[in-house]
Image (cartoon, rainbow, N blue to C red):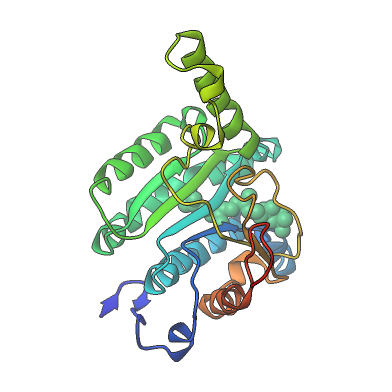
């Protein structure tokens, strides 16, 4: 089947079929756009634009590979510290992305969500994002979370606040608060925790990405800069995941 983003390789690529175990939920920290641009003598925003293309290709590849949940770190709560021009550009990208890609996302039956605080997004971007969420709401295929104005600590703080309100109003007792009660208030409520997190560009840290949810995630780091990341890199990462032994605190058996 031909999609606008390329060929659907599901079931045809021996590399794909050789993956014994696939993660259910992949999280990606898309890092290195600025360095990619600088190496080419381009402005940083050109790196983000190229990063958006890599993101499109990655969504498509994950869908072809049968990944059920994909979370993409597009803008962190700390990214507001960047130069105004760059922030403005980054804030425009989601609008551009959803306007041009919504039809393909619908064709692929992809359900999109945004995690993070959308209140601070520019009004037109927020409107397009919310309309796109609404349009894909009934889709039953891959789930894609865009982490926009997202911070893992903020996610936990908001969840704790909701639990505190429930206690204050007498709806729950303090002893009802356990890990699953807290997880149910996070932005990723009712989704499996990410079991695999990828970060590009050689940085070896989580940078406030899904900090609660990634407690048991396998981590994979690559020096590849995000705009250069492609299907082959993704397959290599997934092959490594497939070979990892996950013990969750138990002993290996
Ligand atoms: C980090 O690279 C990247 C970002 C802060 C932005 C990521 C955004 C995209 C890939 C596009 C998202 C598009 C949509 C539609 C949501 P960096 O700028 O920190 O790179 P550097 O470390 O090399 O400077």
Question: Does residue 43 appear in this view?
Answer: no
Residue 192 vs residue 130: left or right?
A: right
Residue 120 in the image, given as x and y percentages of width and height: 51, 28
Quarter of the image for the N terminus: give it: bottom left
Residue at 59% x, 72% y is: 241
Residue 58 vs residue 220: left or right?
A: left
Residue at 38% x, 68% y is: 63
Instruction: Decide which of 226, 72 is in the foreground and name it.
Output: 72
Instruction: Decide which of 61, 102 is in the foreground and name it.
Output: 61
Residue 106 vs residue 22: left or right?
A: left
Question: Does residue 230 appear in this view?
Answer: yes
Instruction: Decide which of 32, 63 is in the foreground and name it.
Output: 63
Quarter of the image for the C terminus: give it: bottom right
Residue 102 in the image, given as x and y percentages of width and height: 30, 54
Instruction: Note whether 177 is above or below 112 in the view shown.
Output: above
Residue 101 in the image, given as x and y percentages of width and height: 34, 58
Residue 45 in the image, given as x and y percentages of width and height: 61, 54
Give the image quarter of residue 244. bottom right
Residue at 49% x, 80% y is: 20
Residue 37 vs residue 56: left or right?
A: right
Residue at 27% x, 45% y is: 137
Instruction: Decide which of 182, 188 is in the foreground and name it.
Output: 182
């Amino acid at each position: 089947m031909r999609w606008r983003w390329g060929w659907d390789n599901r079931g045809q690529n021996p590399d794909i079929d050789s993956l014994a175990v696939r993660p259910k939920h992949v999280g990606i920290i898309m890092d290195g756009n600025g360095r990619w641009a600088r190496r080419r003598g381009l402005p940083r925003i050109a790196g983000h634009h190229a990063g958006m293309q890599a993101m499109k290709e990655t969504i498509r590849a994950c869908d072809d590979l049968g990944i059920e949940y994909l979370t993409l770190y597009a803008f962190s709560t700390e990214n507001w510290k960047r130069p105004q021009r760059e922030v403005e550009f980054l804030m425009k990208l989601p609008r551009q992305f959803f306007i041009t890609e919504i039809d393909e996302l619908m064709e692929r039956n992809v359900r999109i969500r945004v995690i993070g605080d959308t209140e601070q997004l520019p009004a037109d971007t927020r409107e397009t994002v919310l309309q796109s969420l609404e349009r894909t709401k009934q889709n039953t295929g891959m789930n894609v979370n865009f982490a926009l104005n997202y911070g893992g600590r903020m996610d936990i703080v908001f969840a704790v606040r909701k639990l505190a309100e429930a206690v204050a109003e007498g709806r729950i007792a303090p002893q009802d608060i356990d890990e699953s009660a807290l997880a149910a208030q996070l932005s990723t409520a009712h989704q499996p925790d990410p079991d695999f997190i990828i970060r590009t560009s050689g940085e070896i840290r989580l940078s406030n990405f899904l900090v609660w949810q990634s407690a048991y995630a396998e981590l994979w780091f690559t020096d590849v800069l995000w705009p250069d990341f492609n299907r082959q890199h993704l397959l290599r990462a997934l092959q490594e995941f497939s070979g990892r032994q996950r013990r969750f605190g138990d002993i290996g058996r």
